[in-house]
Amino acid sequence: MKTLDEINQYYVENTESELFKGVKNIVPGEGNPNADIMFIGEAPGAVEDKLGRPFVGPAGKFLDTLLESIGLKREDVFITNVVKCRPPNNRDPSDEEKKAFKPWLKAQIEFIDPKVFVPLGRHALANFLPNITISKVHGQIFKVGRNSRAVFVMYHPAVALYNGSYREILLSDMKNLKEYLEKEKAKEEKQLKMF
Ligand code: URA
């Protein structure tokens, strides 16, 4: 079995995208390889590009606050992006660029096998649930795909930087996420006791 570093190295060498050419650093993602929660953004920004780490700019600072609000640290979860290289001038990645990076994300998902995915914001969410409106269903769990994976719908933490009223919404949604995980844990423990 490969390690996560080996998986990342494989996709650094085998992902075909012009985006690699313009970056200071590739941003593969970081955190606990056995995490229950996997946060997935769209693409690195300027600070992430400079440091080679995901969500370490202003939006990342608020993500840290959100994690702390439910008693978690970055090291407890896994944080990555759909696209692992910063698009020039922070433009949105194209569909083609996202497609090129999908096998890499898929391999990370298979390796980590989290209990819940949290795509951050509508762009990342569209990769999992293309037909839903984030404002209507944020803070809720959806089951997707053949393996019925749990996807928790959440705004991108950057929205709270532009509009302070989203801060409380995001903090409140994090509580729902914590409750969901606690319920799942209780279910698992009940099942274990049956044996
Ligand atoms: N926004 C994202 O979507 N990803 C990052 O890594 C940073 C900001």
Image (cartoon, helix red, strand yellow):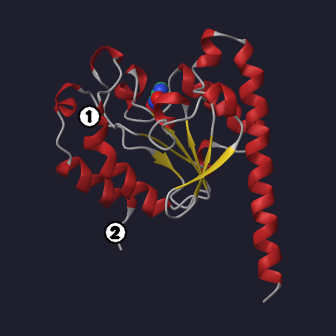
Q: Is residue 22 visible?
A: yes
Q: Which residue is rendered at x = 82% and y = 86% of the image? A: 194
Is residue 124 toward the left or the right of residue 154 in the image?
left
Rendered image: mark on residue 97: 1
Query: Are there few (<14), some (14-19), or many (20+) residues within 10 Å of tag 2?
Result: few
Query: Which amino acid lies under the numbered mark 2 shown in the image of this protein?
Result: Lys
Is residue 109 toward the left or the right of residue 180 in the image?
left
Q: Which residue is rendered at x = 47% and y = 46% of the image? A: 30
Query: Are there few (<14), some (14-19), or many (20+) residues within 10 Å of tag 1?
Result: some
Q: Does the residue labelled 1 lie within 8 Å of ligand 1?
A: no
User: Quadrant location of residue 92?
Assistant: top left
Measured from the top left, where is residue 104 in percent x and y? 32, 51
The residue lying furthest to the front in this view is 131
Give the camera-side residue of 127 and 59: 127
User: Quadrant location of residue 174?
Assistant: top right
Q: Identify the secondary structure beneath mark 2.
A: loop
Give the camera-side residue of 13 and 192: 192
Q: Note whether 21 is above or below 38 in the view shown.
A: above
Q: Quadrant where the C terminus lies?
A: bottom right
Measured from the top left, where is residue 172 in percent x and y? 79, 31
Q: Where is mark 2, residue-wise?
A: 2
CA gap, disc 2 and disc 1: 25 Å
